[in-house]
Amino acid sequence: MTKQGKPGKTKISISGYQKFVVILLTFFQFTIMLNFMVISPLGAILLPALQITPRQFGLVVSCYALSATVSGILIAGFADRFERKKLLLFVYGGFLAGTLLCAFSVNYSLFVVARCITGLFGGVIGAINISIITDILPIQSRGSAMGILSSANPAAMVLGIPIGIFLANKLNWHAPFYLITIIGLVAGIVMILFMKPVTEHNKIIKRNNPIAQLLNTVANPNYMIGFSALTFITIGAFILQPFSTVFIVNNLGVSLNLIPLVFLVSGIVGMVAAPLSGHIADVVGKYRLFFIANIVSASVIICYTNLRNSPFWFVLLLNCIIAISISGRMTATMALISTVPAPEDRGSFNSVTVSIQQLAGAIAAWVAGLVIVQSPTGVIRNMNILGWIVVVALIFSVVMMARVNNQIKTADTSKLMAAHMEHEGQETEK
């Protein structure tokens, strides 16, 4: 059942059923991210089709994140009171209903409502996925599982743009949402038929009412360390994104026609790197991988944000390295953070983390908008300042995650001592 890695490291093999659950949850995560990613390439079609302005289109994009932030807080007090499979089915059904409403939308107002519904349900699915993986897998194997789950994000980035453009051009802008609904229904049926209930957390008595459960989770000092670390990690990951395309074209001199290739190649690299990072995390240690990935990220981003006109191959190479470092950083983060909450608080904790990620992403975009200035010629100024902000965020995240790692070591030591004392007691009785 176990495979030995480096001395002191033990990786526990997972069963075929556990692998099936991880892959199924990854597919759920993929449909969530695909729904989010497909909006971007539809912008040029939606503006004239719905007769809206760029500012109104911005609301279409942001209302999903805002709804996801609210839903994470709302569900936190209830997340650990329900059997996880039933809860996942309920929120995934709501997500698919919102996606279908997007397909049916014939005007701007209805489309905004549909995006809000989609975000309200879809925003918490990631939290439930992580809770299920944490429930069914030991810490020694969670890195690999989280790596597979993380691959859904770059996979959606790689497929979202071409799928959105192809279906919208061949049929209409409603088609991508119909497709997501159909493949989501198939995944839901597979879960109903083959996934077992996840009930271990229900065996622990919940003494708090939902509001008290939420407040206790948010106010828990040990959890606050994880929340703080996740905030800095998210800011560091997303603050460059809003202006990345403009920077590549106007500052680095890459043709606009080559931009899809940049995102395609770096997305594929990230998709491959995520599960590999998970395996590495289980072998060499989660925090060690996190630390190395942050060093690589900081070094490359400082170089990248200070570039001027550059060859395409060099820009592509740096984007691929950034994608690899982000995959390693996020995979290690998910594996480490999953160990922070007590079993009875996992759903609440992960729901709050979803809200924090959404809110931190919004803050990152807001800060980027305050810092960046565009010259009359289109050149982006102060991108190097954003690069240093990323480095500062990464430094804080390394410090905070070191505290999370120490919490894990302390908890493991306490468990070993308790087991040793129990064994000594049994020997004495004999």
Image (cartoon, rainbow, N blue to C red):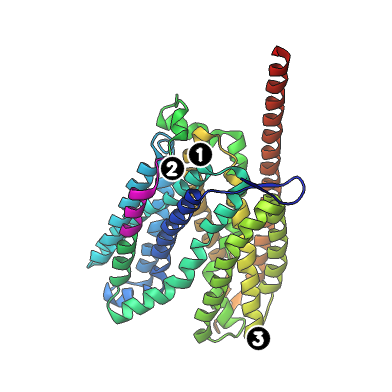
Amino acid type, callout 2: Ile
Judging depth in this view, the residue of 420 and 395 nearest the camera is 420
Q: Quadrant of residue 302?
A: bottom right
Residue drawn at 36 percent across, 79 percent down: 166
Q: Residues within 10 Å of mark 1 (few under 14, many from 20)?
A: many
Amino acid type, callout 1: Arg
Closer to us: mark 2 or mark 1? 1
Q: Is residue 277 magenta?
A: no
Judging depth in this view, the residue of 316 and 238 nearest the camera is 316
Q: Earlier in the sequence, mark 3 or mark 1?
A: 3
Residue drawn at 65 percent across, 51 percent down: 282
User: Which quarter of the figure is the C terminus placed in?
Assistant: top right
Q: Which residue has dot 3 on it?
A: 311
Judging depth in this view, the residue of 16 and 363 nearest the camera is 16
Q: Is residue 228 visible?
A: no
Range of magenta residues: 185-197
Q: Earlier in the sequence, mark 2 or mark 1?
A: 2
Element on which disc 1 rests: helix
* Residue 346 image label: 1
Residue drawn at 47 percent across, 28 percent down: 204
Q: Which residue has dot 2 on it?
A: 73
How far from the left and from the top, in percent, is residue 19?
Answer: 50, 53
Element on which disc 2 rests: helix
Q: Earlier in the sequence, mark 3 or mark 2?
A: 2
